[in-house]
Image (cartoon, rainbow, N blue to C red):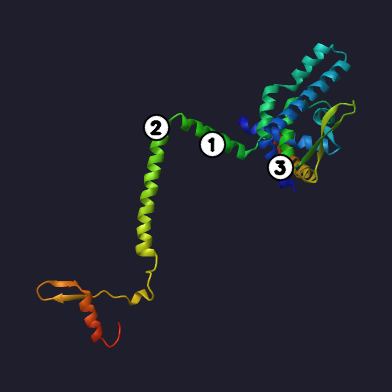
Amino acid sequence: MPKQDAKLLQGTLDMLILKALSLGPLHGFGIGQRIVQMSGEVLTVEEGSLYPALYRIEQQGSVGSEWGVSENNQRAKFYKLTRAGRKQLQVEEENWERLASAVFKVMQTA
Amino acid sequence: MEKLRIVVARLRGLFLRRSVEREMNEELRLHIEMRARENMRRGMTEEEARRAAERSFGNLARVKEACRDVKGGGVIETLLQDLRYGARTLFKNRGFIFVVILTLALATGANTAIFSVVDAVLLRPLPFGDPERLVALRETLPDEGAIPVAYRTYAEWRGQWRSYF
């Protein structure tokens, strides 16, 4: 069921975005960079796909945004985790851990 | 509070579509620019850097479409689209509209007429005091059977009664 796969990936991306923002406000480009960096360059994010996810999360109220100026003195829209976003991240982290350890257990059985 | 923010964002998507669209285009353009500058810093030529930036961004048109889906007015926007579509289809088909409106008008009229009667006869109380004490008088004649009572007869009877019904 390919659809289910996509859903799982999408959910994961949302969580990774929240996690990246938990360290401080970032613009979209920075979020992508930070995810790749935090994964030890293992994960690659198709940069465009960040934005629909980001906008969705924003509409859910997990992040807020405002225009500002980047480190290179360039206009950019910065995203910041809201309090609801922090709670959401916690929930998603717990779910993820449960899922990951369950999958791990399955794969370990001989 | 969060709910309110979502509602505001949705309304913005619905009514300020152009400014939302402009903001999104700006944001995505700046992203690609940032990536291109990063690429140039790593030694690519300007042209290479721009093309690589576009490549790593993915399909821009599709991304925008997905963003619009999220940013739009949501359910309300879909509803408005459906209404617009419905109206357009109807106007292409005037004969059909005419028949539909006529049918609805006749049906509504007939219903109203029937209901007016039911309302007056069955639902509304009679416009007299103590309606349960009303009676109908008839007299029975040997030759003609039961007939309505003429007023004179009634007045006469009334003179003979000691009390009303």
Mark nearer the N terminus (3 vs 1): 3
Residue placed most toward the observer, B112 or B89: B112
Residue placed most toward the observer, B83 or B36: B83
Name the residue carrying label 2. Answer: B95
Mark 1 is on which residue type? Leu
Q: CA distance from mark 1 to mark 2?
A: 20 Å
Q: Position of residue A62 (x, y in %)?
A: 76, 41
Seen in the image, is B70 located left or right of residue B158?
right
Name the residue carrying label 1. Answer: B83
Residue under the point 37% across and 46% down = B107
Chain letter of disc 3 in the image: B
Is residue A108 visible in the rendered image? The answer is no
Is residue A37 visible in the rendered image? The answer is yes
Please tell me if label 2 and label 3 are on a single chain.
yes
Under circle 2, the secondary element is helix
Residue under the point 35% across and 50% down = B110
Q: Give the residue furthest to the bottom.
A: B162
Residue under the point 35% across and 75% down = B132
Q: Are marks 3 and 1 in contact (CB under 8 Å)?
A: no
Mark nearer the N terminus (2 vs 3): 3
Under circle 1, the secondary element is helix
Q: CA distance from mark 3 to mark 1?
A: 23 Å
Residue placed most toward the observer, A102 or A72: A72
Please tell me if label 1 and label 2 are on a single chain.
yes
Q: Residues within 10 Å of mark 2 (few under 14, many from 20)?
A: few
Mark 2 is on which residue type? Gly
Chain letter of disc 1 in the image: B
Q: Is residue B124 above or below residue B60?
A: below
Q: Position of residue A52 (x, y in %)?
A: 71, 31
- Location of residue B117 (image quadrant): bottom left
